[in-house]
Image (cartoon, helix red, strand yellow):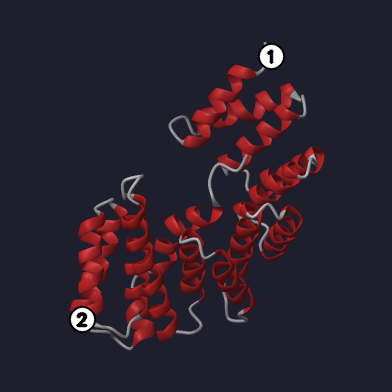
Amino acid sequence: MNPGNPMLRGVAMALLAALLAPGALRAEQNAPPADGETHFNNGLDHLRAGRLEMALEEFKTAVKQDPKNPYFFKGLGVACAQSADRCPAKDQSCRQKSLDEAVIAARKAIELNPYYADARNDLGTYLIRSGKREEGKKEFLAAFSDATNPSPAFAAANLGQALFEDKNYSQAASWFQTSLGKSKTHAPGYLGLSDCLLAMGKLDEAVTALEAGTKALPEDWDIALALGDAYYRAGRFGEARTHLELVAGKDPTGSAGRRSLDLLKKLPK
């Protein structure tokens, strides 16, 4: 049911959003070299626009200009991880090389700032994508356990997703519940919990979890889609239609909207 891996979606979106409010670098880094910051900001712009190769070059230059700035290494790690996604499907060496570089960059960010919880979440994600699942889960647990972590819900959901992928559904559900205990507005918590409950054959509980999710996040179309799908599975076709039509209307060109249209075609007339 989950329309996307919470870890990857978080890395793709939250990383850049929180990476850098205007002026954050100077405020926390005692005015780093202007050239390094310029290259870093250029890298962010290129990354947002999908110009990955240019982003990589800018981040690498920023790191050379100021090798003691953890934000610069974080940006470099994000770009390296995205590079892995662009490798040809059959070229595993290309993918692994990019992920190895992402791991190195994330480790350096943590070395420079041991309390950089976002970088530890990144590291966990990169390790899991590299096949080092136990190491990755340890990083998520360390991020969650860090008393200075401003977003423990994110780390808990990441750990839950990793356990879900390991088919350890009971423990995964527990971590998604922990994520929601930390933040009632963390969408991956609801999506992940419902996936676990469905995997354990607990359809009614999955519906209940997603209903709570739509109340907490009424404009999250992934959750609304998941609830429509759950209603469909439960044979509650009228309620399914209501939610799926809402998503299709609100997100007509997005993945949730397209998936809703597909499900609507399956509903009884």
> Which residue bears the numbered disc 2?
65
* Placement of the C terminus among the 4 image quadrants: top right
Residue drawn where x is 63% and y is 43% of the image: 218
- Disc 1 versus disc 2: distance between alpha carbons? 62 Å
> Which residue bears the numbered disc 1?
268
Depth order, front residue of 10/90: 90
Depth order, front residue of 87/261: 87
Mark 2 residue type: Gln
Q: Crowding near pointer 2: few (<14 within 10 Å), some, many (20+)?
A: some
Q: Residue furthest bottom?
A: 30
Depth order, front residue of 128/204: 128
Residue 100 showing in the rendered view: yes
Task: Check whether the beta carbons of the residues at disc 1 and disc 2 lie within 8 A of each other.
Answer: no
| Residue 78, percent from left and from top | 37, 63
Which secondary structure, mark 1?
loop
Mark 1 residue type: Pro
Left of 116 or right of it: where is 78? left
Left of 181 or right of it: where is 150? left
Q: Earlier in the sequence, mark 1 or mark 2?
A: 2
Q: Quadrant of residue 73?
A: bottom left
Q: Quadrant of residue 98?
A: bottom left
Left of 212 or right of it: where is 95? left
| Residue 89, percent from left and from top | 36, 44
* Placement of the N terminus among the 4 image quadrants: top right
Q: Crowding near pointer 1: few (<14 within 10 Å), some, many (20+)?
A: few
In the rendered view, would you say 121 is above or below 265?
below
Residue drawn where x is 80% and y is 42% of the image: 202
Residue drawn where x is 80% and y is 43% of the image: 205
In the rendered view, would you say 192 is above or below 33?
above
